[in-house]
Amino acid sequence: MEGLKLRVIVDGPRDPQLNMALDEAVARLRRDLDYDTLRLYMWLPSGVSIGRRQDSRNSVHIDEVEKLGFKLVRRPTGGAALLHPQDDEITYSVVLSNKHPLYNLDVATSAARIAEGIAVAIGKLGLEAGVRGLGEPWSRSFCYVNPGSSDVMIGGRKISGSAQRRDWGSLLQHGTLLLRYDHSLFSRVLRIEEDVSGKIVGLRELLDLPISKIAEALIEGFAETLGYKDYYRGSLSSEELSLALELYRVKYSTREWNLDGLFHG
């Protein structure tokens, strides 16, 4: 991958709506840069995100989200509704140039290959994980989110899912690494029809590790999976921050976008 570089951003907890604005801003501006980006981040307060084509009212208990002081946000990518608990999840976003080899693969295959970074990271921490689309066996009764090729599994239980979008001349994939699963909280804000607590697991339910060690494993896992022998630690540029703040103002902080999926920009 001559000419391509990887910037790694270890971000702190951010407002859920700003997190989605940042992901879109990085993807929109990728064509003007000479590096791809891996960003690791968390949520403050807890966020409830829905796919960009999803019906918010049929997917989420909006009144409960508001009662708990959580924030609802519609993602720039697809997929189903998900709770991002404040201290119990690490989220990743990967933005790749259309010159990256993974861009030439179909969405399902490329999504699974990128998500392999999570599985490799978990392996570095001492557990065995697999990606569903790369041969991990799964049960067809698995729900609360629809089974996807990029789901990462440990012992038949899901620990990570992701969603992808190709637009603006780049590939954006973001996904989760669940640290703890609280079914009562998830089912309070999401419209979950069955108890899936036995089919989902958080990393800290299996290993007691500091966030810093998990983050380092994720960086190494994604760098290896994406094909980068070297990477550098960076930060968001002033242009990315400026665009993200504008997207936050006109799109991601609006009820029109978050509830109805309407954006005239």
Image: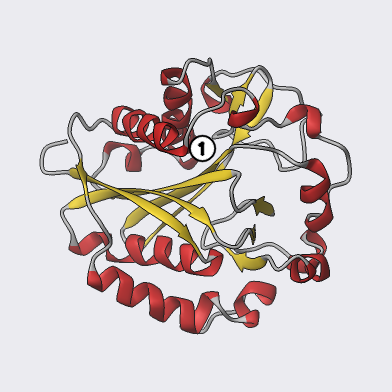
How many residues crowd around disc 1 within 10 Å: few (fewer than 14), some, or many (20 or more)? some
Give coordinates of residue 61: x percent, y percent.
82, 63
Foreground: 98 or 204?
204
Would you say 3 lies left or right of 112 here?
left
Amino acid found under the numbered disc labelled 1: Ala
Give coordinates of residue 155: x percent, y percent.
66, 17
**Residue at coordinates 32% horizontally, 71% vertically from top-left?**
241
Foreground: 110 or 57?
57
**Residue at coordinates 40% horizontally, 81% vertically from top-left?**
246
**Residue at coordinates 69% horizontally, 25% vertically from top-left?**
157
Q: Residue furthest left?
A: 3
**179 in relation to 77, above or below:** above
Give coordinates of residue 195: x percent, y percent.
87, 37
Q: Quadrant location of residue 205?
A: top right
Residue on which the image places disc 1: 108
Would you say 215 lies left or right of 66 here?
left
Foreground: 263 or 216?
216
Secondary structure under the numbered disc 1 in the rendered image: helix
**260 in relation to 135, above or below:** below
